[in-house]
Image (tube, rainbow, N blue to C red):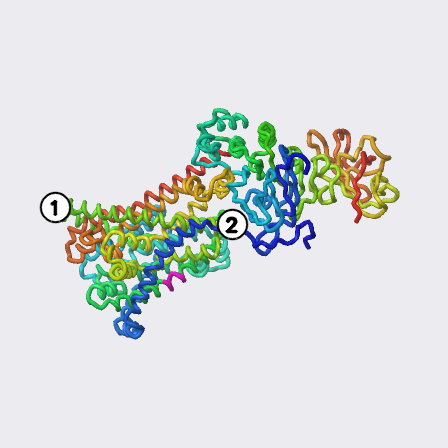
Amino acid sequence: MPTTTTSPARTHPRRRRATGAPPFLVGWGAIAGLVALVPLVYLVVRSLDAGPGAFLEVLGRPRTGELILRSLALAGAVTAACMVIGFLGAWLVVRTDLPGRRAAGVLLALPLAVPSYVAGFTWISEAPGLAGFWGAFGVLVSVSFPYVFLPVVGALRATDTGLEEVARSLGHGPARVLLGVTLRQVWPAATAGGLLVALYILSDFGAVSLMRYDTFTLGIYTSYRGTFNRTPAAVLGCVLVVLAALITWGEARARGRAAQLVGRGVPRQAAATRLGRWRPAWAGFVGLVIAVSLGVPAYSLTHWMVVGSSLGVDLPDLGDAGLVTLQAAAAGAIVTTVLAIPVGVLAARYRGRATATLETATYVGHALPGITVGLALVFLGVRVLPGIYQELPLLVFGYAVLFLPLAVGAVRTAVVAAPPRLEEVSRSLGHSRFVTLARVTLPLAAPGVGAGAALVFLTIAKELPATLMLRPTGADTLAVRLWSYTGVGQYAAAAPYAVLLVLLAAIPTLVLNRAFREHDRALRAQEKEDR
Amino acid sequence: MTGTEAALRITGLTAGYPGTQVLHGVDLEVPTGALAAVLGGSGCGKTTLLRAIAGFHPVDGGSVHLAGRLVAGDGVDLPPERRRVGLVPQEGALFGHLNVARNVGFGLDRAGRRSGRVEEMLELVGLAGYGKRMPSELSGGQQQRVALARALAPAPALVLLDEPFTALDAGLRAEVREQVRAALRAAGATAVLVTHDQQEALGAADVVAVLRDGRVVQAGPPREVYSTPADVGVGEFVGEAVVLPATVSRGRATTVLGTLPVPGVADGVGQVLLRPEQLRLDGAGTSGVGATVVEVVFHGHDTTVLLDLDGRTVRCRTMDAGGLRVGQRTEVRVDGSARFFAS
């Protein structure tokens, strides 16, 4: 037991000043939390506007049940297909002697850069007969399977092959090892990826609307556009949020389990599995996936650009839409990042129940389909903030809700990487916490925060459903223009927008990736020099 | 206190985390201008102590006075920026986005930065003319010296050094330690060095405070702590020790090494602590005891010899072990007095 050099027990309460979160950060972060939660809360309030009876009535309509079934059927089918393609692709690229597996590894990740509505445009413009379930299914699988492929590649590279060799030596054939051992090892990574796919399919508006397959998102949009009574749209929005929230919850759990399974140290990689006489068949499979997911868009875009150039491209129109996109994305990225800074700093430096709650609140946007955020803010704009309804600020508000998770993650990672000792040195040298944040923490975190802002900018630039509902009158972004031209069958006019959007979407996958890698390399080189 | 107030006075300091107390009443006083070392193993609470002094860890009880001013305790809890404590962290110590001059001037106001204080400090740490360099262009030792210049620039009441040499190469460590010590002397600064390295503490500090389980178990000049440790644990921690069971009767302890003088000790049973360099193989000291050489390890400047005394292995350090072979019989004697600890 501690003996008595201690002076008599102090009666004053334990002071928390030195370690508690600074009030200015908490206040600033609370604004971000509020921004993130307002649409969700208002959507629920608005859906109960006409009383619980009306709510239940909409819920009980056969149309509602039908939409749920259609959405879930599409999400289930696409997720299953993505998991099969993603897993097989990853296994072929990482563990076998597939010809051209390096190139295949890059090409199978690239469809991530094709927005779903661009893929939708390329399919429907070439084969209008594909409209409906199978068309929507094909389009969404072709752009979504990398969400499974990439994490499974990561998991395969991180797991030791010892167990597989043991299974082989115990007399199990290659197929049995693949399904019994390999698949089991990467299952958490595959399910996390699969649930992410399910979430995106459930939230997708662009592809299903262009492929004319009626799902929840499209149902909400038509219900909102078609009638004066907007309560059904609000109720459907609530249901969609619940479905998305359930999937997000499952995804977070699966991701946690996947992270636990990744071992420490450098795993040993055994010699590649020889595909033998099945090699051409597997190569054909990978080639087909690449042809459908990249070849079709490439062919179709070239085709319609050629057709369009003979008709003449409306350059001023394209420039207008580009400018609107630029403005909206820049404003959205700045506001989102400014809101994300306090939350990211609090999450990185002051772990606690309050900051965890705040971080979770800003994370709501991850589970909110763009269409529901758009809908909620339309209601809010009409009823509460008529001054900014159909003005840029309301659109920016919507972007902030949707992309706060992205920005908060970037800020948090950047701040975690900046050594906290430096902040303490600054405090000891007589600077307050606010000055320390401005002069030490943020300058050190600036590259990471900047990269996050750039990512938000590019993601906003291709956002469709919320933009469609919230954009200022007459101000069309590239995505909105592409969607409306495609909707009325003007494929040649739509093509330049699609090309621009693919380029925009490819920037983060290519340039940012390289920038991060070079940054990493520079850091490592510097560390080596330091030694 | 008489005359001048101590630069740092800690009284009955308790601190910890919810559910675990780390500091159980620390008492420590560092006179103005002195370099004190807080020496302790991992988990002894030395980092918490340092953070409590600097104002980054809340104090539960007791008090901290800096230059006579109460900064923590008794309902007072000054924020770090108002304590005037300079901090030299372990590593990664410099602001990577600022050059050397701006790092050093970070704690100065505009007038201070223009007064030539920055150049003065750089000169003090032997880095005059390095102002325009970026931290990444400096070696590890140079970075630590810049960190020291930065801490000294606003003339703090106290400089805290948190294991500042651990991250350096062994060869560089002694050199940088000397430079830091010289700079602290030249600046007339009071400093507290936190370390787990005995040699560093004994070699650099004016005062060594041994921290164990959240308490200062002994504080004093390095020589005193080394030669008259407060207990066996401290003795073993601050240097190599030979600990033997002993019985004391009339001021003499009977051990396997013979009868050793332990002046002023009451009769009883316990242990004696000797330093390996007190065990002599060259004929000096008490009357000899027979022993067998078990192992001979040559270090260059001296040699460690392990001896077997009736089944008990003792360690002996000698300057000249020429001709000693494993298995050889020899005679070991004890030089100087032993420390006795009753059990």
The residue singled out by tag 2 in the image is: A17
- Judged by depth in the image, the label closer to the viewer, 2 or 1, is 2
Residue B316 in percent (x, y) is at 76, 36
Labels in figure, total? 2
Label 2 packing within 10 angstroms: few (<14), some (14-19), many (20+):
some
In the rendered view, would you say B229 is above or below B322?
A: below
Q: Quadrant of residue B96?
A: top left
Query: Which is nearer the eye, A11 or A226?
Result: A11
**Outermost residue to the front:** B3
Residue stretch in magenta = A245-250
In the image, farthest residue toward the left: A311
Looking at the rendered structure, the secondary structure element under dot 1 is loop
Q: Which mark is residue B41?
A: none
Q: Chain of mark 2?
A: A
- Verify CB contact (< 8 Å) between mark 2 and mark 1: no
Q: Nearer the viewer, residue A207 or B223?
A: B223
Residue A312 circle label: 1
Front-lying residue, A478 or A388:
A388
| Chain under disc 1 | A
Q: Is residue A402 left or right of residue A302?
A: right
Up/down of A354 relative to B312, above or below: below
Which of the two labelled residues, at mark 2 and mark 1, occupies the earlier sequence position? 2
